[in-house]
Image (spheres, rainbow, N blue to C red):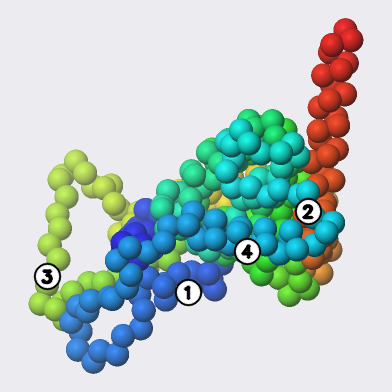
């Protein structure tokens, strides 16, 4: 089922993707494993009928992280949690949000931006949680992120993002709202800010199977699917102008609002044209703020959370005094 979902998403004409080329290739290989087959006949894909959900995998990863964390004396009192609404968390807990792999709007088997929005709001509402920690390794994915951006702009608790390997396209769209973004190694990849679509024409394949596609439109429906038909016919102008360009402008406006220091770059800088950068150049371009080990990033999250809690306490005391 998880591959069926991914195939439908990747092959749909209506899905605009914010994703790196490498990430798209990886997703296609996951959705359509290579099968040796000389004849153009449909083949079955064999895979786990009941694959673990994204939450299952994220919770398993967090359990390993907690083990490593609590093995160090200086982190004995630090609590990372994915149980964002728990009433039993110690004060100063850190919400652990994992953005790993292909980003979807709503899926049980891949990162879901809708679920992430629910999670981050639950963590924001829990008084025991003082900071959001985003652990990111994603090439991007679906472009439906404007409502999530509104939600993230409304948060008051600090957010720190640690990039492990890749923070590109839709993933950067999400993490640009962080107070601090750091990369784990010198070779992590950041950027790919832009919008693309990659679609496929299966008509030749269907013809070899003896299937003929017949489609007609009503006289008054001459524009129905026209921009997609034109795209397949090698005339992408309207699709680019109507779909891709507005999404890209939305993306650029969002990151400039979230990281205003990027406004110091010229409008035609490679940052705004879809280029990707290693850690050193991403720091130079101000896409991220530095490089840290995992434990240094956790320590920074603890400090951010402590500062937030202290400030909130001062505000409450001031209001009580008034």
3D distance between C-alphas at marks 2 and 3: 66 Å
Relative to 280, say whether 35 is above or below: below
Q: Earlier in the sequence, mark 3 or mark 4?
A: 4
Residue contact at pointers 1 and 4, CB within 8 angstroms: no
Q: Earlier in the sequence, mark 1 or mark 4?
A: 1
3D distance between C-alphas at marks 3 and 4: 53 Å
3D distance between C-alphas at marks 3 and 1: 29 Å
3D distance between C-alphas at marks 1 and 4: 29 Å
Bin the neighbour count of mark 2 within 10 Å (Cα to Cα): few under 14, some 14-19, many 20 and up: few
Q: Earlier in the sequence, mark 1 or mark 2?
A: 1
Q: Nearer the viewer, mark 3 or mark 4?
A: 4
- Name the secondary structure under disc 2: loop
Look at the image and tell me in which quarter the N terminus lies: bottom left
Residue contact at pointers 3 and 4, CB within 8 angstroms: no
Please state the horizontal and vertical placement of residue 306, each as a whole percent of the image. 83, 39
- Name the secondary structure under disc 4: helix
3D distance between C-alphas at marks 4 and 2: 15 Å
Residue 302 in sight here: yes
Give me the disc on residue 43.
Answer: none
Q: Who's the residue at 64% across and 66% down the image? A: 166
Please state the horizontal and vertical placement of residue 269, each as a whole percent of the image. 74, 61
Question: Disc 2 marks which residue?
Answer: 76
Residue contact at pointers 1 and 2, CB within 8 angstroms: no
Question: Disc 1 marks which residue?
Answer: 25
User: Which residue is nearer to you in this view: 320 or 197?
Assistant: 320
Relative to 218, say whether 227 is above or below: below
């Amino acid at each position: 089922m998880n591959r069926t979902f991914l195939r439908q998403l990747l092959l749909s004409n209506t899905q605009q993707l914010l994703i790196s080329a490498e990430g798209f290739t990886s997703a296609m290989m996951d959705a359509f494993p290579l099968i040796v087959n000389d004849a153009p006949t449909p083949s079955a894909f064999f895979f786990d009928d009941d694959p673990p959900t994204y939450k299952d995998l994220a919770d398993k990863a967090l359990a390993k992280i907690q083990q490593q964390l609590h093995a160090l004396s200086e982190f004995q009192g630090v609590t990372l949690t994915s149980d964002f609404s728990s009433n039993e968390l110690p004060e100063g807990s850190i919400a652990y949000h994992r953005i790993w792999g292909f980003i979807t709007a709503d899926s049980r088997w891949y990162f879901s931006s809708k679920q992430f929005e629910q999670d981050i709001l639950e963590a924001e509402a829990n008084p025991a949680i003082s900071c959001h920690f985003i652990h990111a390794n994603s090439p991007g994915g679906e472009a439906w992120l404007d409502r999530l951006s509104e939600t993230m702009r409304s948060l008051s608790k600090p957010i720190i993002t640690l990039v492990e390997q890749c923070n590109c396209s839709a993933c950067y769209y999400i993490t640009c709202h962080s107070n601090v973004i750091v990369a784990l190694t010198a070779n992590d990849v950041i950027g790919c800010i832009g919008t693309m679509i990659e679609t496929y024409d299966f008509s030749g394949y269907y013809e070899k199977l003896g299937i003929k596609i017949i489609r007609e439109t009503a006289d008054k429906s001459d524009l129905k699917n026209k921009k997609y038909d034109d795209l397949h016919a090698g005339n992408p102008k309207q699709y680019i102008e109507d779909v891709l360009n507005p999404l890209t402008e939305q993306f650029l406006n969002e990151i400039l609002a979230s990281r205003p220091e990027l406004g110091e770059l010229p409008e035609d800088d490679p940052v705004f044209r879809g280029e990707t950068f290693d850690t050193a150049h991403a720091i130079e371009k101000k896409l991220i703020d530095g490089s840290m080990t995992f434990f240094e990033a956790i320590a920074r999250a603890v400090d951010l959370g402590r500062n937030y809690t202290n400030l909130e306490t001062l505000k409450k005391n001031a209001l009580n005094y008034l």
